[in-house]
Amino acid sequence: MTTIPPATPITPEAAAALIAAFAAVPFETEPATYLKVAEEEAP
Amino acid sequence: MTPESILELSSAGLARAIRAKKLTCVAAMEAVLARADSVQKALNCFIRIDRDEALAAARLADAELARGALRGPLHGVPMAHKDMYYREGVPSSCGSKIKRDVPAPSTATALKRLDAAGALQFGVLNMAEFAYGPTGHNYHFGHCRNPWNPQHITGGSSSGSGAAVAARASFAALGSDTGGSIRGPAAFCGLAGIKPTWSRVSRHGAMPLSFSLDTVGPLARTVEDCALILGAIAGADPLDPTASTHPVPDYIARLSRPLKDVRIGVAKRYFHDGMDTEIGSLVQASLEVYAKLGARIVEVELPDMEPWTSASLMIVSAEAAAAHANWMRTRPQDYSDQVRARLEIGLAVPAATYIESLRLRGVALQAFSKAAFGKADLLHVPTVAFQTPTIAETDVGGGAGLMKTLGTLTRLMRPGNFLGLPCLSVPAGFTKKGLPTAVQLIGRPFDEATLFAAGHAYQQATDWHTRAPRL
């Protein structure tokens, strides 16, 4: 998938930036990774 | 005490006065019920007031106190809440036509914990339909109005919570925050409001909008009140598997920590884009107060957050559409045009994009934490960057300007939801039009205590939070 369809909540320009940001996500990442990071970043 | 002097108290102040037998729970309840009646026509902030039940509960609370039984730190404090916190057998409208007469299946954990702390619920408050709107418009129950100027929005979705507490018609109120719904109304109405760390407060019995982003928290007159109430409702809950087991500190005990050498980060990127000049001056003046209190002000360079805001929109759009899919198939005519339009947009978000957006959260939180909290203990950024708009200006329905208007209103708040970070909105003064504005303090995950200490110190040095609208 190279594009996000137009009927979405963001503009085409924002969609392009979002796709670029997705490229920084390692292949092994799953949504729950967020919880682990939150615990690690807690004081 | 006179009814007027009772209503000037904060939640914490009222609880102290009741414990000291300076007034009764019944006197406090009668004062707030009379005030609620007197402001309702102008503000439309209540959906229901349970007068007889509330007075009976206040009499019981007085009887308990007379025999030395103190329920908790909020004993006798009257509160009304956003009408999306369920009480078993009682309808919670969620601001909607669809749920207005449907009895709730169980009681929300947040309400049970407030009950246990001694708070007395006396009614339910107006809100955006299904908490899916940042302005305070509601086409089923009528628009909620800002007590500082009824032509202006309250912000949403916790519109009634903002209006009622600011109008002294409730001592505090629960709101919910998925994309700014606590912080927006707190800022527009001149209140403190805490969006806690995601998972800090159980969502059991709270209407879902977007389970990856939804948070439960209070709007109140003071930061101290927010700390007191969050302390009562936070913590693990077997009824909500997502509620964190991370320990809940004693926020009140940590409230008076000095600000000396606390590092406050200022981030110009993103948060100051297109800033209104007058709002910018108030934000800067707020920062100078923190500096005078001994905080060290440091500049931080944040990563590009535009994609994170987009990702949060993908998540809320897809999850809200999924939650409402059945009613969208069977009762689409019962939604207002705006909510139905937003839910239709969510149906068009590709599954892969939704999941990629969720996968981005951990990476984003790591990057943000490194950039922000490597240098600072908390961030000081505006809650909103613009003057409070009028109800008419933001009455966009489901039309072409919908997403642009909504995006502008929530822009500075969505990153906090996407990153799951605690964000405390604190009043920071008034514009020349007499409308409040605010700063949000953003902290590390589960570090609400540092935000409360900073916000409380600021409120000890300023008087914005003591000012009440004339109604």
Image (cartoon, rainbow, N blue to C red):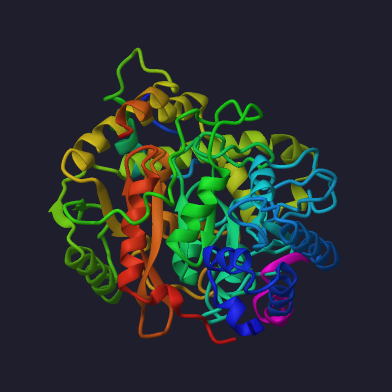
Q: Is residue B268 magenta?
A: no
Most common SS among magenta residues: helix
Residue B423's x, y, as percent? 39, 50
As rendered, which of B188 and B389 lies closer to the eye?
B188
The image quarter containing residue B465 is: bottom left
Residue B134 appearing in the image: no
Quadrant into which the C terminus of chain B falls: bottom right
Q: In this view, does B259 lie to the left or right of A15?
A: left
**Relative to residue B35, is residue B76 depicted above or below?**
above
Q: Residue furthest top?
A: A28
Residue B329's x, y, as percent? 75, 37
As rendered, which of B330 and B363 lies closer to the eye?
B363
Q: Residue at x 16, y 43 (%)?
A: B375
**Relative to residue B407, is residue B3 depicted above or below?**
below
Quadrant into which the N terminus of chain B falls: bottom right
**Relative to residue B347, is residue A26 depicted above or below?**
above
Q: Is residue B209 left or right of residue B459?
A: right
**Relative to residue A42, is residue B400 depicted above or below?**
below
Residue B261 appearing in the image: yes
Residue B67's x, y, as percent? 75, 57
As rendered, which of A39 and B43 lies closer to the eye?
A39
Residue stretch rendered in magenta on the structure = B36-48
Q: Residue at x 51, y 46 (%)?
A: B231
The image quarter containing residue B126 is: bottom right
Q: Which residue is drawn at 39% across and 21% down?
A: A33
Residue B422's x, y, as percent? 40, 45
